[in-house]
Image: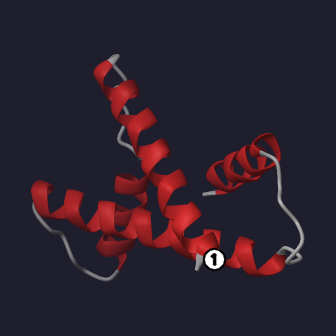
């Protein structure tokens, strides 16, 4: 459960970073929105923009929670990973999707 909560917090941080990038002028579609849009298009669903944003946000946080949960259960109970190590793992996950 702790891993899932950590994943949600990390996803919130990543979402904040993407929001700042958008405010700074980033023109590309945010990765969670793009991935969600493509996945929905493949199954014949084309929601309007605001609804797509809701789906993308839900999918993004669900994935973050799931990855955090898996990460949490794979660590030994006595392990307490450093912030740097956890951040690098999070970055690696972000780069793979």
In the rendered view, does 80 fall on the left or right side of 29?
Answer: right
Give the residue at x 56% y 73%: 4
Within 10 Å of disc 1 (Cα), the crowding (few <14, some 14-19, many 20+) is: some
The relative height of residue 91 versus residue 17 in the rendered view (above or below) is: below
Q: Which corner quadrant of the image does residue 28 belong to?
A: top left
Q: Which corner quadrant of the image does residue 33 belong to?
A: bottom left
User: Is 76 in front, or is 41?
Assistant: 76
> Looking at the picture, how far across and down is residue 63, in whole percent?
50, 70
Give the residue at x 41% y 55%: 32
The relative height of residue 30 versus residue 57 in the rendered view (above or below) is: above
User: Is 24 in front, or is 74?
Assistant: 74
User: Is 56 in front, or is 62?
Assistant: 62
Q: Looking at this rendering, what residue extends furthest in the front direction?
A: 78
Q: Which residue was labeled with disc 1?
A: 69
Q: Which corner quadrant of the image does residue 74 belong to?
A: bottom right
Secondary structure state at the residue bearing disc 1? helix
User: Is 23 in front, or is 70?
Assistant: 70
**Quadrant containing the N terminus in the rendered view:** bottom right
**Quadrant containing the C terminus in the rendered view:** bottom right
> Looking at the picture, how far across and down is residue 85, in whole percent?
82, 47
The relative height of residue 21 versus residue 91 in the rendered view (above or below) is: above
> Looking at the picture, how far across and down is residue 87, in whole percent?
71, 45
Give the residue at x 58% y 62%: 6
Give the residue at x 84% y 73%: 75
């Amino acid at each position: 459960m702790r891993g899932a909560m950590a994943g949600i917090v990390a996803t919130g941080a990543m979402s904040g970073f993407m929001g700042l990038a958008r405010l700074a002028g980033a023109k590309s579609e945010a990765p969670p929105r793009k991935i969600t849009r493509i996945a929905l298009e493949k199954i014949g669903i084309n929601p309007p923009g605001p609804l797509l944003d809701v789906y993308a946000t839900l999918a993004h946080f669900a994935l973050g929670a799931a990855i955090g949960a898996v990460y949490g259960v794979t660590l030994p109970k006595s392990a307490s990973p450093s912030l740097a190590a956890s951040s690098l793992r999070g970055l690696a996950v972000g780069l793979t999707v």
